[in-house]
Image (cartoon, grey):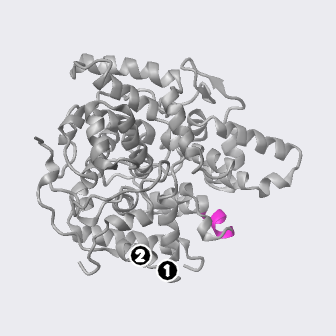
Amino acid sequence: VNGGGFGDLLAGARRGDERAFACLWRDLNPGLVRYLRVVSAGDADDIAAETWISVIRSLSRFDGDEEHWRCWVFAIARRRAIDHGRRQSRRPEFATADIEAGWDAIGGDVAEEALQNLDTEQALRLVAALPPAQAEVLMLRVVAGLDVAAVARIVGKSSGAVRVSVHRALKALTGLLEPTA
Amino acid sequence: MSNSPWNSPSSSSEPDDLDALLSGLGRGTPPSADLRPAVDVVSALTAPATRGELRGLETALSAFRAEHGMSPTFPRGRSGSRRLRARLVVAGGAVAVAFGGASAAAFTGALPAPVQKVVHALAGGHRPASPPSPTVAYTRSTRPAPAVIASARPRIVGLCTAYRAASKHGDTRFLRSAEFRRLATAAGGTDHVASFCAAVPTRPVVTPGGRASGRPSSVPGSGRPSGLTVPTHAPSTHATHAPGTTGRPGKGKGRTQTSPPGSRPSNPHRHRGRASPSPTG
């Protein structure tokens, strides 16, 4: 969050200062959309918009620092995504083959380029190809910037389980990107 | 003063592999070869915001104004929801408010090449057309239908037009270009570009809301433009109930943030600042 500090922005937003709110929004929305693109069956932009409406309505009741804020907003987004998933018709099992399919979709390109040129889109596709639980904790750790304990609370697992998921996710990504792996 | 659930004591959060990876980067230690790919992915995940990711601001501000300014006593019941939706439809269809325009501009500097913008715009609207996961309550998307992407992201129409033209004239330069690679990424592989573009309408149409869209008549209902329209259902009015969590999230260490406007909210370096301060836990 830029300028003025989080506390001031939050106070401003709670008073109805739309510039303060816009700062908070711009700070968080990109990460929110990336997270939702990985975990959600619905349109990430739509779910993010729904999330913000919930946030706006409950803003006067929120109190906490910036870490709490991020945790709060992502937790709301997660619930919205789950609601969205429930409304969607049931989809076939996410098969292991899809991981390869997801990788094939970008693998050729990545192989031709230096890895550091990996763009966000490609990275999201890669993460989306991971098992869902791993993908989610990785996104919460990375794009939400939440620590292990916070992620554990959001997903309802133990810190140990989160750590294991992160470990496996990183390992899987490494495996996917290793030319010889 | 608050009924937020975030103030209960936090258990200490021991570092995980990601902390180790990021703290290594922070010390300037080059990642070991085996971790390098993971570092690249993490970096890409935290790249600067794209235009597409900032597109919903006007909509959010409309809701914010409805809550705070325009209608201070805005009811929270069902009818309120409907009214809010009505407002959002207007706001969403109508356009770049001056405020939103300025804020979008602020990010322009952070954006990479134009092609990148196109790609991210394309990338922003993934819709599930694919088979996903069942074990969790929600599912994921890996490969959206072309027409669905195109309806949400009119620019893909342009890329496909370029692709068709290049194919027609045997122009192989396009096939070697970054644009083509991006298109291939969106299509799900170079082999799929032809069929992907075949399913993309040739020209964008303007929807009643004023939004350009390549939506063909056969697009499924899920293909609405994503910049935002309206929620498809009434959002929760009690966000504090949303998370299934009750503890405070982290160390409670407020970050002092000095990044300039337009900087990404979460890059690895910034992330370091809020990782567990104690390397050994």
Residues at marks 1 and 2, CA–CA distance in whole angstroms: 7 Å
Identity of the residue drawn at 59% across and 63% down? A118
Q: Which residue is mark 1?
A: B31
**Crowd tier of the residue under label 2, counting other residues whose Cα lies within 10 Å: few below 14, some 14–19, many 20 or above:** many
Q: Which residue is mark 2?
A: B21
Q: Which residues are magenta?
A: A107-112
Q: Measured from the top left, where is residue A152 in percent x and y?
A: 23, 61
- On whether disc 1 and disc 2 are found on a single subunit, the reply is yes
Identity of the residue drawn at 39% across and 61% down? A142
Q: Measured from the top left, where is residue B236 in percent x and y?
A: 24, 33
In this view, B199 is above or below B203 = below
* Viewer-closest of A98 and B270: B270
Using residue B267 as the reference point, say whether residue B170 is left or right of it.
right
Quadrant in which residue A11 is drawn: top left
Split into 4 quadrants, where in the image is the N terminus of chain B? top left
In this view, B68 is above or below A135 = above
Q: Amino acid at mark 1?
A: Pro
Q: Amino acid at mark 2?
A: Leu
In this view, B228 is above or below B73 = below
- The chain ID associated with circle 2 is B
* Viewer-closest of B196 and A60: A60
Q: Main secondary structure of the magenta part?
A: helix
Report if the CB atoms under discs 1 and 2 are less than 8 Å apart.
Answer: yes
